[in-house]
Image (spheres, rainbow, N blue to C red):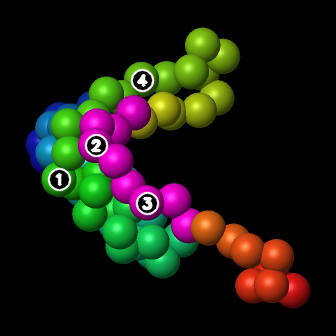
């Protein structure tokens, strides 16, 4: 990361992925998804309305399955 006198932050793709992975771990306690993000190629872009940042990750990850008995 580097900053300028205008207080602009420049993050490399690796630094941004690390920051997002750390946030996923802290906010959602999902280490599996955080590791997957760090270890796989990804594409990042803003949504058309600019309200969401979208990260498309390569590779597969097992979704968490919630059964009726575990949801009660």
Under circle 1, the secondary element is: helix
Residue annotated with mark 2? 59
Quadrant position of residue 20: bottom left
Q: Position of residue 35 (x, y in %)?
A: 26, 63
Under circle 4, the secondary element is: strand
Direction right: furthest residue: 72
Residue 42 to residue 1: above or below: above
Check contact, mark 2 vs mark 4: CB within 8 A: no
In this view, the mark in front (4 or 1): 1
As measured in the structure, the alpha-carbon distance from the residue carrying label 2 to the one carrying label 4 is 18 Å
As measured in the structure, the alpha-carbon distance from the residue carrying label 3 to the one carrying label 1 is 15 Å
Report the quarter where the C terminus lies: bottom right
Q: Position of residue 50 (x, y in %)?
A: 60, 21
Label located before the other in sequence (4 or 1): 1
Which range of residues does the magenta coloring cover? 56-64
Residue annotated with mark 4? 45
Check contact, mark 4 vs mark 1: CB within 8 A: no
Check contact, mark 1 vs mark 2: CB within 8 A: yes
Q: Which mark is residue 62?
A: 3
Check contact, mark 3 vs mark 1: CB within 8 A: no
Would you call the spot at circle 2 few (<14 residues within 10 Å), some (14-19), or many (20 or more)?
few
Instruction: Kindly tell me whether residue 1 is visible in this rendering.
Output: yes
Label located before the other in sequence (1 or 2): 1
As measured in the structure, the alpha-carbon distance from the residue carrying label 1 to the one carrying label 2 is 9 Å
Would you call the spot at circle 1 few (<14 residues within 10 Å), some (14-19), or many (20 or more)?
few
Residue 14 to residue 62: above or below: above
Residue annotated with mark 1? 39
Q: Position of residue 29 (x, y in %)?
A: 48, 77
Label located before the other in sequence (3 or 1): 1
């Amino acid at each position: 990361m580097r900053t300028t006198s205008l207080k602009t932050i420049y993050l490399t793709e690796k630094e941004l992925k690390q920051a997002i992975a750390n946030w996923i771990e802290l906010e959602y306690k999902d280490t599996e998804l955080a590791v997957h993000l760090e270890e796989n190629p990804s594409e990042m872009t803003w949504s058309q309305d600019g309200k969401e940042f979208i990260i498309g990750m390569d590779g597969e990850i097992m979704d968490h399955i919630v059964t009726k008995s575990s949801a009660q």
